[in-house]
Image (cartoon, rainbow, N blue to C red):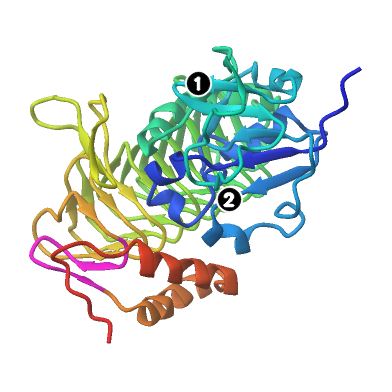
């Protein structure tokens, strides 16, 4: 009789780098895709195992102390950059020293990692008995656009398991329209205003507790809006998901908003992923399709990656903002704590803590940026913790410099 597993360990591999800037401020398993984060989905496959977390050093202070504690022998390690499938639970049957591999990456193993390995780097297969992971186990995630394109299907899959579709526990005005109401869930405290329309004929629509939908707004499924999110009057949302307390207006199509992020004015956001505490100024427009209909290429670190996708929009790190009338080319990536403004298209790759736009970018001082973050978070009754401040300071030191961008630091 094999010994029972001692714990479930979520770990980060090299996808922690290719998912930047979104993964700069959180472990990969905290990224949203559908109704739950990656970690919540993985955890659901192993509900009875104690949880441990193996994250990069600059994020360890943000982990729950118990989960960041010592990892016992005989644990099951699962890659945090996964979209789990029905077969992931079978990883619990891996023999000690065995590993599942998918697309050249270890996605699960039983035992201890190779000596010298550090979270956030490629996990070597040396010393492990490797097996090809079943196709039903999981989709390995490497880039932000993997999550954006998978998101609509994730909402449909997860909503089907909720067993809450068809329950309308919020307030629906008599002039509001629900198409396919049996495919809609409204949580307690939610409200659908006069003349708004929720169209679930193309996929489920799940509005979590306290979501407010303004007059004349249109939401087309599949869609998930996190607790206390707001949909502004006359907004048009299709295939979107958000974390808690996001605000959306204008047109949003096939996009993910992580949490506490505002895109509440006119303008188009398409096939994009916005981190937390972002704000898009009125009239911000993102291109998600090239005029020649060729696949979009995206700068990922030092590499220009061919996504193989026709539709890729903006990837925006936490605490970043755009001014009114801002425009972005297909496949633009902007880092953490950027403030982007001015006429014309800014560069398609913008390092963290950059201020400016097409004409000029400067590296902004850390303390002044922190003052802004504190002011923004206070509007939602929040303040950055000491661990969050140290994490942002690390990003400023190690991920905010690029040749040709002057610094305003003293």
Q: Position of residue 298 (x, y in %)?
A: 23, 39
Is 112 drawn above or below residue 165 in the view shown?
Answer: below
What is the secondary structure assignment of the residue under circle 2? loop
Is 48 drawn above or below residue 365 in the view shown?
Answer: above
Q: Position of residue 195 (x, y in %)?
A: 43, 40
**Which of 288 and 336 lies nearest the eye of the viewer?**
336
What is the secondary structure assignment of the residue under circle 1? strand
- Who's the residue at 55% across and 29% down the image? 126
Quadrant of the frame with the C terminus:
bottom left
Relative horizontal placement of residue 4, taking residue 8 as reference (left or right): right
Q: Are marks 1 and 2 in contact (CB under 8 Å)?
A: no
Is 250 drawn above or below residue 279 in the view shown?
Answer: above
Residue at the right extreme of this rendering: 1
- Who's the residue at 54% across and 12% down the image? 135
C-alpha span from label 1 to label 2 = 21 Å
Q: Which residues are magenta?
A: 352-363
Crowd band around label 2 with a 10 angstrom C-alpha radius: few (<14), some (14–19), many (20+): many
Q: Which residue is mark 1?
A: 102
Q: Position of residue 194 (x, y in %)?
A: 47, 44
Q: Which residue is mark 2?
A: 55
Q: Is residue 358 magenta?
A: yes
**Which of 182 and 207 lies nearest the eye of the viewer?**
207
């Amino acid at each position: 009789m094999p010994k029972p597993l001692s714990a479930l360990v979520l770990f980060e591999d090299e996808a922690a780098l290719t998912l930047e800037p979104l993964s700069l401020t959180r472990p990969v398993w905290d990224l949203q895709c559908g109704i739950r984060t990656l970690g919540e989905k993985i955890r659901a496959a192993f509900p009875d195992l104690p949880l441990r977390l193996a994250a990069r050093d600059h994020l360890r202070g943000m982990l729950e102390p118990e989960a960041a504690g010592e990892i016992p022998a005989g644990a099951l390690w699962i890659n945090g950059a996964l979209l789990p499938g029905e077969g992931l639970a079978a990883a619990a049957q891996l023999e000690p020293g065995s590993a599942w591999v998918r697309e050249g990456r270890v996605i699960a193993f039983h035992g201890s990692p190779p000596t010298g390995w550090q979270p956030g780097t490629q996990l070597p297969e040396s010393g492990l008995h490797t097996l090809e992971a079943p196709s039903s186990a999981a989709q390995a995630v490497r880039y932000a656009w993997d999550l954006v394109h998978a998101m609509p299907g994730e909402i449909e899959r997860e909503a089907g398991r909720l067993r809450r579709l068809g329950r309308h526990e919020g307030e629906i005005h008599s002039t509001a329209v629900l198409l396919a109401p049996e495919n809609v869930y409204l949580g307690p405290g939610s409200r659908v205003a006069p003349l708004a329309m929720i169209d679930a004929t193309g996929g489920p629509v799940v509005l979590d507790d306290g979501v407010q939908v303004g007059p004349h707004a249109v939401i087309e499924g599949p869609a998930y809006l996190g607790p206390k999110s707001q949909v502004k009057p006359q907004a048009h949302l299709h295939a979107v998901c958000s974390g808690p307390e996001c605000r959306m207006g204008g047109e949003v199509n096939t996009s993910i908003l992580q949490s506490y992020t505002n895109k509440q004015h006119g303008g188009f956001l398409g096939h994009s992923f916005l981190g937390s505490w972002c704000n898009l100024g009125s009239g911000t427009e993102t291109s998600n399709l090239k005029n020649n209909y060729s696949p979009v290429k995206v700068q990922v670190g030092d590499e220009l990656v061919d996504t193989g996708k026709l539709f890729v929009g903006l990837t925006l790190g936490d605490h970043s903002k755009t001014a009114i009338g801002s425009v972005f080319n297909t496949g633009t990536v902007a880092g953490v704590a950027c403030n982007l403004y001015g006429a014309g298209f800014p560069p398609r790759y913008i390092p963290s803590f950059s201020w400016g736009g097409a004409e000029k970018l400067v590296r902004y001082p850390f303390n002044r940026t922190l003052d802004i973050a504190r002011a923004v978070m206070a509007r939602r009754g929040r303040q950055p913790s000491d661990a969050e401040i140290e994490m942002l300071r690390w990003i400023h030191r190690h991920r905010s410099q690029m040749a040709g961008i002057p610094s305003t630091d003293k």
